[in-house]
Image: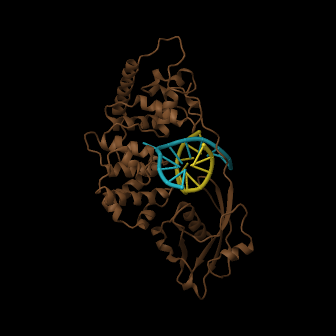
Chain colours: A brown, B yellow, C cyan
Amino acid sequence: MTDDSSPDTAAPPVSEKMSEQMSAQAAARLLSWYDRNRRDLPWRAKPGEVADPYRVWLSEIMLQQTTVPAAAPYFRAFTQRWPTVQALAEAPLDDLLVAWAGLGYYARARNLHACARTVVERHGGRFPDEEAALLELPGIGAYTAAAITAIAFGRKATVVDGNVERVIARIFAVTDPLPAVKPTLRRLAATRTPNQRPGDYAQAMMDLGATVCTPRKPKCMLCPWSDGCAARASGIAETLPRKLAKADKPTRRGTAYWLLNPDGAVLLRRRAERGLLGGMTEVPSTAWDETAPDAAALLAHQPIAAGWRALPGMVRHTFSHFHLELGVVTAQAGAGWRAVDGMWVPIDQLDQQALPSVMVKVVRHALAHA
DNA sequence: AACACGTGGGT
DNA sequence: TACCCAAGTGT
């Protein structure tokens, strides 16, 4: 039973009016739970405070597929350095990439910059307060548009993230697997969205999923909706939502070139603007393929002809969709080093570069073994 | 529609 | 160790 029609039971059909009342009652109970268990998060307006759309937007982008503890320090750094969307729009993209380094999904940073500039240039520096207009902005999809509408502007919107999908799947005992069942979950979620306190309700749903209706070992005893939860009634709460098995990750292999110049600076370069780690800084390397590069490939990809020496060990890293094994070779650049394509960065300035985590690993490996 | 796109923490 | 998971979006 995955649609929202009346269940085929002996109970009398629930009238529309009655189900509306039940939803309103459920929302009130959730909001009461929220008021009693409100978490203090860096981006969350305190009771009585007016939400700042810029901070709501920034936090929602950072929280996409990202845990609260991971996002929090980045949010503080960004808001301290760029307190307004105007300030962010005026900053060079490269400054954002340096500040975003380590947080992952770097398209978010590129879209963040594009979005800030669009808001300033086309919306007078103010975020639109309607879902449809927000949806037009780079980096803002269905979830984020609804979240900003509800949380920043106090307007009704159905906010559906992974937490909400889980809560709804359990309440209604939806057993069909994700992602195909997403539209159904969205419809069901919409039937419970109240007119009152849209922002608090959205955050309450997500908090409920994050702290009570958790993926494993849900704390049903603490749940304000436990008595109406179909999955709990049938003892399958922890198994929901069901998900299709994911394809396993292939392994790719490559070799990175740790090249030092006579001044003791290391050669880095900027990656392509789009795609994996787009616009970020890297230690030059061969292509990353299934098979490790042979001697010919090492010569073909070397940034400058030099006598390369392999460092012991290997850098391992796992991206969203593949494993990477990276060997590291090192050399001193001889005559002609000034003409090499890339940038020479003093070792003590590496922390000012837009180095993604995988490259931080390469740097650490080289410094430890070179 | 399915896949590309990061990272670090939990079990 | 290996897999799952986290306030998704773009193509």
In which image quadrant can residue A155 be found? top left
Image quarter (top left, top right, bottom left or bottom right) of the C terminus of chain A: bottom right
Q: Position of residue A226 (x, y in %)?
A: 46, 24
Where is residue A198 shown, x and y percent of the image? 34, 36
Q: Is residue A50 above or below residue A277?
A: above
Residue A167 position in % (x across, y down): 48, 32
Viewer-nearest residue: A4 or A47: A4
Residue visible at 47% across and 68% down in the picture: A353
Residue A5, percent from left and from top = 50, 22
Residue A15 drawn above or below residue A121 = above
| Residue in the foreground of this view, choosing between A36 and A206 | A206
- Above or below: residue C11 compared with residue A163: below
Q: Quadrant of residue A367?
A: bottom right
The residue at the point 50 percent across, 33 percent down is A185
Quarter of the picture containing the N terminus of chain A is: top right
Q: Please identify the quarter of the rendering in which residue A193 is found.
A: top left
Q: Residue at x 54, y 73 (%)?
A: A268
Q: Nearer the viewer, residue A281 or B3?
A: B3
Pick the front one: A254 or A92: A92
Disc tally is 0
